[in-house]
Amino acid sequence: MDYAAFCAACGLRRGDADSFEEFACVGGIPKYREFVEAGQDAVVLAESLDFDDAPYMEQEPQRLLRDEGVIGLNAVAVLEAVGRGAERPSEIASRLGTAQTNLSRLLPQLLDATILGV
């Protein structure tokens, strides 16, 4: 869900720094707002969603990939490499210790699902 739709669905004011922080912390998914206390700052919100005893977003990367139909055992590893700064396919492959050709099916899937951007 984009930022404008998120604000409309949650009754938040667009352009407000707090609403954008909340949008970013819950990945644009209004349902996740139900799992945290209202009025928490962004750091507390992120910590409670991602790192508490029963984090709600712990399996989010796997769920997202499954929902988008992205297949391949290296999908999460590719996303982790990109998140750690790898930008080119050769860089990603190097960080994963694999040949770039092993990513030839996976990278287009991630791009088509708009999980990765150009």
Image (tube, grey):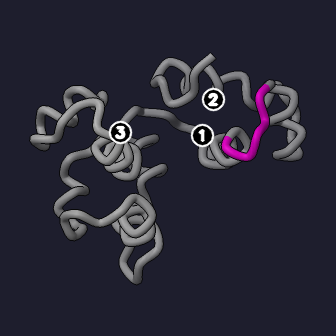
Viewed as shown, does residue 33 lie left or right of 45? left
Say few, some or many: other residues with alpha carbon within 10 Å of mark 2 (under 14 / 14 to 19 / 20 or more). Answer: some
Nearer to the camera, 83 or 41: 41
Circle 3: residue type: Asp
Which residue is under mark 2? 106
**N-terminal-most mark, 2 or 3:** 3
Q: Residue at the spot x=65%, y=25% of the render?
A: 107
Q: Is residue 90 above or below residue 62?
A: above
User: What percent of the width, then of the height, locates residue 90?
Assistant: 87, 27
Residue 110 is inside the magenta segment: no
**In the rendered structure, are the residues bearing label 2 and label 1 in contact, judged by CB atoms less than 8 Å apart?**
yes
User: Please, what secondary structure does the residue beneath circle 3 have?
Assistant: helix
Residue 84 is inside the magenta segment: yes
Q: Which residues are magenta?
A: 83-87
Whole-number angstrom distance, CA of label 1 to CA of label 3: 13 Å
Which residue is under mark 1? 72
Main SS of residues in magenta? loop
Which residue is under mark 3? 67
